[in-house]
Amino acid sequence: MIASSRVLIAAAAAALLVAGGANARPDTATRADAIGFLSVPRTALQGKQARVVVRTGPQASLCRLSVRYADGATEVIGLAVALRRRVTWTWRVNEVAAPGRARLTASCEPAPPLAP
C-alpha cells in the first residue's frame, strides 16, 4: 500500500484458478485502512460468471479490479464505487481465458472532489 497526504492508493491481490480446482483464500488485511479480498471464487470457468468482494479502507470510494490469466493476458474487470467499505464485481470470465492460476488485483482510491 502506498499512502501520501493527497492520495491513498491501496492494492491487494488474490489468486484463482481458471477451469480447475484451487484453494484461493481471501486476504486477511491487518490494518484498518488496508483493503483485502473478502470473497474470491475457488475456481472460475471460461464463459461463466465470477464474483469478487473487496473490503476497502475508510477513505476509499472508487475501486478497480483486473485479472491476469495464466498466459499473461490481462483483463480490466472495471471500476466500482465502494458502499459501506465493500465493493463487489460480477463478470463473465473470457471464453478463451487460459486455464491455470490467475491473479486478481484490486486497487482503491478516494473519489475525486466534486467541482464547485
Image: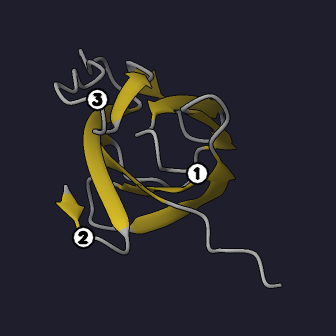
Which type of secondary structure does the marked residue at label 2 adopt?
Answer: loop
Amino acid type for the residue under numbered disc 2: Ser
Q: Position of residue 54 (x, y in %)?
A: 47, 33
Q: Amino acid at mark 3?
A: Ala
Q: Amino acid at mark 1?
A: Ser
Residue 84 picture quarter: top right
Residue with the mark numbered 1: 61
Along the viewing direction, whichever of 45 and 79 lies nearer the viewer: 79
Q: Position of residue 109 (x, y in %)?
A: 46, 61
For label 2, the residue is: 4
**Secondary structure found at label 1:** loop
Assess whether mark 1 and mark 2 are in contact (beta carbons under 8 angstroms): no
Tell me the CA gap for discs 3 and 1. 15 Å
Farthest residue in the right direction?
116
Upstream in sequence: badge 3 or badge 1? 3
Can you identify the residue that label 3 sits on?
Answer: 32
Q: Earlier in the sequence, mark 2 or mark 1?
A: 2
Q: Quadrant of the N terminus?
A: bottom left
Q: Name which residue lies at 37% across and 52% down.
A: 98
Rate crowding at label 2 as few (under 14), some (14 to 19) or many (20 or more) other CA atoms within 10 Å.
few
Q: Is residue 21 visible?
A: yes
Residue 80 vs residue 11: left or right?
right
Element type at mark 3: loop
Which residue is more in the foreground, 42 or 57? 57
2 or 3: tag closer to the N-terminus: 2
**Position of 48 compared to 67: left or right?**
right
Examine the image and state in which quarter residue 114 appears: bottom right
Asked if 83 appears above or below 66 in the picture, the reply is above
